[in-house]
Amino acid sequence: MIKHVTNATFDEEVLASSKPVLMEVWASWCVPCKAMEPTIDAVAAEFEGRVQVTKLNVDENPELAQKLDVMSLPTLMMFKNGQPIDHLVGLATKDRLTGFVSAALA
Protein backbone atom coordinates (compact mmCIF):
# COMPACT_ATOMS: atom_id res chain seq x y z
CA MET A 1 0.00 0.00 0.00
CA ILE A 2 1.29 3.43 -0.95
CA LYS A 3 0.97 6.10 1.72
CA HIS A 4 0.71 9.79 0.95
CA VAL A 5 2.90 11.79 3.32
CA THR A 6 2.69 15.45 4.26
CA ASN A 7 4.73 17.91 6.29
CA ALA A 8 2.79 16.70 9.33
CA THR A 9 3.24 12.94 8.76
CA PHE A 10 6.73 12.80 7.23
CA ASP A 11 8.63 12.21 10.48
CA GLU A 12 6.31 9.39 11.57
CA GLU A 13 5.79 7.70 8.19
CA VAL A 14 9.31 8.06 6.75
CA LEU A 15 11.93 8.89 9.37
CA ALA A 16 10.51 6.67 12.12
CA SER A 17 9.64 3.75 9.83
CA SER A 18 10.98 0.38 10.90
CA LYS A 19 11.30 -0.54 7.20
CA PRO A 20 13.26 1.15 4.43
CA VAL A 21 11.12 3.78 2.70
CA LEU A 22 10.87 4.60 -0.99
CA MET A 23 9.41 8.08 -1.40
CA GLU A 24 8.37 9.63 -4.69
CA VAL A 25 8.23 13.42 -4.72
CA TRP A 26 5.73 14.35 -7.41
CA ALA A 27 3.15 16.88 -8.64
CA SER A 28 -0.18 16.43 -10.41
CA TRP A 29 0.95 18.56 -13.37
CA CYS A 30 4.19 16.57 -13.87
CA VAL A 31 3.92 14.37 -16.98
CA PRO A 32 6.88 12.09 -16.07
CA CYS A 33 5.33 11.68 -12.58
CA LYS A 34 2.11 10.41 -14.16
CA ALA A 35 4.13 8.06 -16.34
CA MET A 36 5.83 6.68 -13.18
CA GLU A 37 2.54 5.70 -11.50
CA PRO A 38 2.33 2.13 -12.89
CA THR A 39 6.01 1.56 -12.10
CA ILE A 40 5.63 2.82 -8.53
CA ASP A 41 2.53 0.62 -8.09
CA ALA A 42 4.38 -2.45 -9.42
CA VAL A 43 7.41 -1.88 -7.19
CA ALA A 44 5.15 -1.29 -4.17
CA ALA A 45 3.47 -4.64 -4.82
CA GLU A 46 6.77 -6.45 -5.41
CA PHE A 47 8.36 -5.20 -2.18
CA GLU A 48 5.20 -5.24 -0.03
CA GLY A 49 6.06 -6.06 3.58
CA ARG A 50 9.75 -5.23 3.08
CA VAL A 51 9.63 -1.59 1.97
CA GLN A 52 7.18 1.21 2.76
CA VAL A 53 6.32 3.17 -0.40
CA THR A 54 5.24 6.77 0.05
CA LYS A 55 4.42 9.77 -2.12
CA LEU A 56 4.93 13.45 -1.31
CA ASN A 57 3.02 16.06 -3.33
CA VAL A 58 5.44 18.95 -3.82
CA ASP A 59 2.64 21.49 -4.43
CA GLU A 60 0.94 20.64 -1.14
CA ASN A 61 4.21 20.35 0.85
CA PRO A 62 6.70 22.82 -0.65
CA GLU A 63 8.58 23.39 2.62
CA LEU A 64 9.42 19.71 2.98
CA ALA A 65 10.43 19.37 -0.67
CA GLN A 66 12.75 22.35 -0.22
CA LYS A 67 14.18 20.88 3.00
CA LEU A 68 14.92 17.65 1.08
CA ASP A 69 16.63 19.66 -1.72
CA VAL A 70 14.23 18.43 -4.40
CA MET A 71 14.98 20.34 -7.60
CA SER A 72 13.34 18.17 -10.29
CA LEU A 73 10.34 15.88 -10.57
CA PRO A 74 9.90 13.09 -10.12
CA THR A 75 12.52 12.57 -7.44
CA LEU A 76 12.68 9.12 -5.86
CA MET A 77 14.37 8.88 -2.48
CA MET A 78 15.31 5.91 -0.32
CA PHE A 79 15.38 6.28 3.45
CA LYS A 80 16.78 3.73 5.87
CA ASN A 81 16.94 4.08 9.65
CA GLY A 82 15.59 7.62 9.38
CA GLN A 83 18.26 8.80 6.94
CA PRO A 84 18.16 9.48 3.20
CA ILE A 85 20.56 6.98 1.62
CA ASP A 86 20.06 7.43 -2.13
CA HIS A 87 17.96 9.19 -4.75
CA LEU A 88 17.00 9.03 -8.42
CA VAL A 89 15.80 11.97 -10.47
CA GLY A 90 13.50 11.63 -13.46
CA LEU A 91 11.59 8.84 -15.09
CA ALA A 92 12.93 5.39 -14.17
CA THR A 93 12.17 1.99 -15.67
CA LYS A 94 10.82 -0.77 -13.47
CA ASP A 95 14.16 -2.61 -13.66
CA ARG A 96 16.08 0.49 -12.60
CA LEU A 97 13.69 1.22 -9.74
CA THR A 98 13.70 -2.42 -8.60
CA GLY A 99 17.52 -2.37 -8.54
CA PHE A 100 17.47 0.93 -6.65
CA VAL A 101 15.20 -0.52 -3.95
CA SER A 102 17.04 -3.86 -3.84
CA ALA A 103 20.35 -2.06 -3.24
CA ALA A 104 18.82 -0.36 -0.18
CA LEU A 105 17.74 -3.73 1.20
CA ALA A 106 21.21 -5.27 0.80
Image (spheres, rainbow, N blue to C red):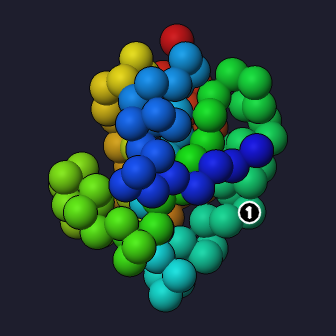
Q: x, y (%) of residue 9?
A: 46, 46
Quadrant containing the N terminus in the rendered view: top right
Q: In this view, does 106 lie above or below 28?
A: above
Q: Is residue 52 visible?
A: yes
**At which x and y percent is residue 43?**
70, 43
Q: Splitting the image into 4 quarters, where does residue 78 fall?
A: top left
**From this viewpoint, which residue is outermost toward the front?**
8
Q: In this view, does 100 lie above or below 29?
A: above
Q: Viewed as shown, does residue 65 lie left or right of 52?
A: left
Q: Which residue lies furthest to the top in this view?
A: 106
Q: Nearer the viewer, residue 102 or 18?
A: 18
Disc 1 secondary structure class: helix
Q: In this view, does 50 lie above or below 62?
A: above
Residue at image coords 49%, 87%: 29
Q: Could you say which is closer to the camera, residue 20 or residue 38?
A: 20
Q: Which residue is drawn at 61% across and 42% down?
A: 53
Q: Name the residue under label 1.
A: 38
| Residue drawn at 63 percent across, 28 percent down | 51
- Amino acid type, residue under disc 1 in the picture: Pro
- Horizontally, residue 100 falls left or right of residue 93, namely left
Label 1 packing within 10 angstroms: few (<14), some (14-19), many (20+): few
